[in-house]
Image: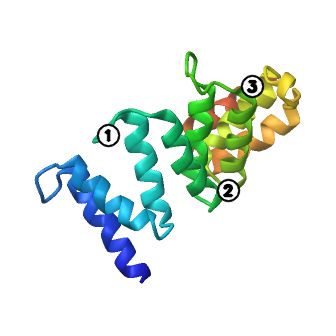
Amino acid sequence: MQGHVRAMHEVGTIYFTGNGLPRNFQMALSWWEKAAKNDYNPSLYSLGRAYREGKGVARHLRTAVEFWAKAAERGHSEAAYQLGNLFAEDGSEMRSLQDAAIWWNNAAHQGHADAQYQIATLYESGAYSHVDVEQSSEVAFQWYQKAAAQGHIASQQKLEQATLMI
């Protein structure tokens, strides 16, 4: 069954991108919904993205959060990272710095380099101390190292700057 679910997702992606078929957001969503009913993480993520961006459906952030949270709870690090971004976004109806930190932390622990960078900046600045992320240069340095090891350019630059200051 997993192969069939993956095929459903791929057909949806082809319709969404218009790669090989005419672009058709409604068909893409239909195929992704079929795969998502089988808890297929890539489809859950893609549906969240469609609702976040309002492609093929009306933009609806709460529905995006539902799809992304389900995918993230099942180990989809990009969904967790995007949830963090959504909750950190200025002016968002979903704004919650505490939730942003939680989801970024979730993604960072799964090895997501951009999330590791975000977590590092939180520890470096101490700006999130009101949501239990206390300032710590040592912890920030560790997260920058993890992200830099994956080729994350901004983290590599932070580490270079840190070594120049020592």
Query: Quarter of the image containing the N terminus?
Result: bottom left
Residue 146: percent from the left, percent from the top? Answer: 70, 48
At 47% from the left and 52% from the top, the residue drawn is 45
The residue carrying mark 2 is 110
Residue 151 appears in the picture as rendered: no
Dividing the picture into quarters, in which one does residue 35 lie? bottom left
Residue located 59% across and 55% down the image: 70
Q: Earlier in the sequence, mark 3 or mark 2?
A: 2
Measured as percent of width and height from the top left, residue 39 is found at 51, 67
Left or right of 118? Residue 139 is right
Neighbour tally class for label 1: few under 14, some 14-19, many 20 plus, Cα within 10 Å? some
Q: Amino acid at mark 1?
A: Val
Q: Is residue 121 above or below residue 145?
A: above
Asked if the residue at tag 2 contacts the one at tag 3, i.e. Cβ–Cβ closer than 8 Å, the answer is no
Q: Element under label 2?
A: loop
C-alpha span from label 1 to label 3: 49 Å
Q: Give the mark nearer the N terminus: 1 vs 2.
A: 1
The image quadrant that residue 13 belongs to is: bottom left
Closer to the observer: label 3 or label 2? 2
Location of mark 1 (residue): 57
